[in-house]
Amino acid sequence: MKSAIELDLATPADDDDHSQGPRIAPVTVVQYADFECLHCARAHPFLKQLRDEIPGAFRLVFRHFPLLADHPRAASAARAAVAAGRQGRFWEMHDRLFEYQAYLRPDAFLLHAEDLGLDLERFNRDLADPQVTARVERDMASGRASGVRGTPTFFLNGVRYGDGWDLNLLRRAILIAAVSTSRVVSRGSPVMVGGPQRLA
């Protein structure tokens, strides 16, 4: 178990992050992901199901980590998600990009944007905005500083989740961390004391 000063996550979640779930949730799950990554696409419906099953247990933070050498379309998909986020539809675009992963192309991004009711002229301007690229690069830099090498990579309350892509173990780790943190909070201690239990 690690203390709050020994966390693996270099950059804690903040208001600029894409996040879903209550900010006061006992567990913050930070996910570094790539829209062209097959493993990330497989994790996507599981995470949606988990949000439905235990909505109060965790806050999900999504950070972009396109693997540029292996996935040439991932960076443009990340920019499309950020551009949609500027119109309040990040998570809807996020879902579509994973659900239609075989079609990560500019024409598909525009179709998604149209279906989501976005202002298409603004969406196109935002896609070309250097600040949108900088937003993706910010996430990538925080991932590299946290030792992220592949996707998906998860951190639970700042501690790197070390059981690879075993999603059932991830569910258990979130629940254990939620129970452990709730007990700490009930004693009046800071939320970030400790981290998730490792599951063998």
Image: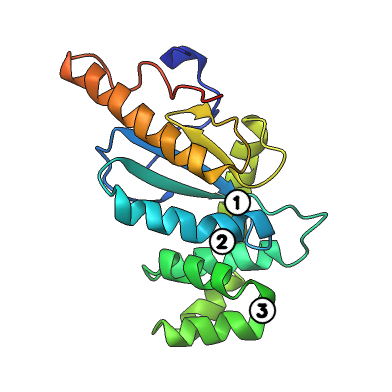
N-terminal of the pair, mark 2 or mark 1, is 1
Front residue (pair 38, 31): 38
Q: Which kind of residue does numbered mark 3 sit on?
A: Tyr
Check disc 1 and report its element: helix, strand or loop: strand
Q: Point out which mark residue 33 bears.
A: 1
Q: Nearer the viewer, mark 2 or mark 1?
A: 1
Q: Is residue 164 above or below residue 51?
A: above
Judge whether residue 16 can be spotted in this image. no
* Quarter location, residue 145: top right
Q: In the shown orientation, is residue 112 left or right of residue 19?
A: right
Look at 77% across and 60% down and name the residue there.
Answer: 71
Look at 58% across and 72% down and name the residue there.
Answer: 127
Q: Point out which mark residue 132 bears.
A: 2
Front residue (pair 54, 24): 54
- Give the Cα separation between the discs numbered 2 and 1: 17 Å
Q: Which kind of residue does numbered mark 2 sit on?
A: Val
Residue occupied by mark 3:
103
N-terminal of the pair, mark 1 or mark 3, is 1
Check disc 2 and report its element: helix, strand or loop: helix
Q: In the shown orientation, is residue 122 left or right of residue 66?
A: left
Judge whether residue 136 can be spotted in this image. yes
Whole-percent x and y of residue 179?
Answer: 29, 27
Look at 65% across and 54% down and name the residue there.
Answer: 39
> Quadrant location of the C terminus?
top right
Whole-percent x and y of residue 11?
Answer: 51, 32
Q: Is residue 144 above or below residue 88?
A: above
Q: Which kind of residue does numbered mark 1 sit on?
A: Ala
